[in-house]
Image (cartoon, helix red, strand yellow):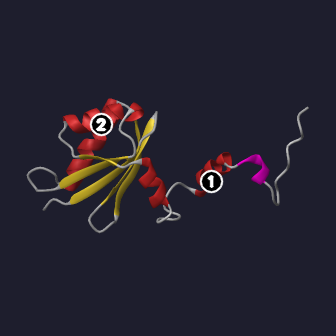
Amino acid sequence: MAGKKLWVGIDVGKQFHHGCAVDADGKTVFSRKVKNRQAAIEELITRTTIKAGAGADGGEVVWALDMTSGSAALLVALLVSTGQPVRSVPGRLVNRMSGAFTGEGKNRRQGCTHHRRDRPAARRSGPGHRARPARG
């Protein structure tokens, strides 16, 4: 079997990362949550390179991370030590692209919670919204 090219996007987190791989046709190959632990990350790298047929079969995996410091340090170190090509995708680009893929990003509840938290309380009005009592 000839190898194929896979692109793996990693949403970096403190305790868990979420990885999603797509092939050349844009088809999702896998989407999974991975603990931020050495054994779990090594298993992800191994399984992904096998899926791509990397090495003798000519397959290739390209990894894209939304951050490369802090919580991503172990992930980056393991990817680099195994010779994996790593790309950084700046947060600004992720933010801009999320509008192009409406409905394919975070689930609706997470998205709503995030946006609601960032909005001023004065703008949180409408059906079903209860105003907080004034402090004083």
Find the residue positioned furthest to the right: 136
Helix, strand or loop under label 2: helix
- Give whichever of discs 1 and 2 has the lower sequence position: 2
Quadrant placement of the C terminus:
top right
- Nearer to me, 135 or 59: 135
Which amino acid lies under the numbered mark 2 shown in the image of this protein?
Val
Above-or-below relation of 108 to 10 = below
Is 114 left, or right, of 66 in this rendering? right
Residue 81, percent across and down? 20, 34
Distance of label 1 from label 2 (alpha carbons): 30 Å
Q: Which residue is mark 1?
A: 109
Tell me what residue is drawn at x 67 percent, y 46 percent: 117
Structural crowding at the residue carrying mark 2, measured as other residues with C-alpha within 10 Å and reported as few (<14), some (14–19) or many (≥20): some
Using the image, tell me which numbered label, if any, was put on residue 60: none
Looking at the rendering, which quadrant does residue 132 occupy?
top right
Is 104 left, or right, of 79 in this rendering? right
Using the image, tell me which numbered label, if any, was put on residue 76: 2
Residue 37, percent across and down? 37, 31
Write down the region rendered in magenta. 120-124
Is 132 left, or right, of 50 in this rendering? right
Residue 92, percent across and down? 45, 51
Above-or-below relation of 88 to 82 = below
Which amino acid lies under the numbered mark 1 shown in the image of this protein?
Arg
Helix, strand or loop under label 1: helix
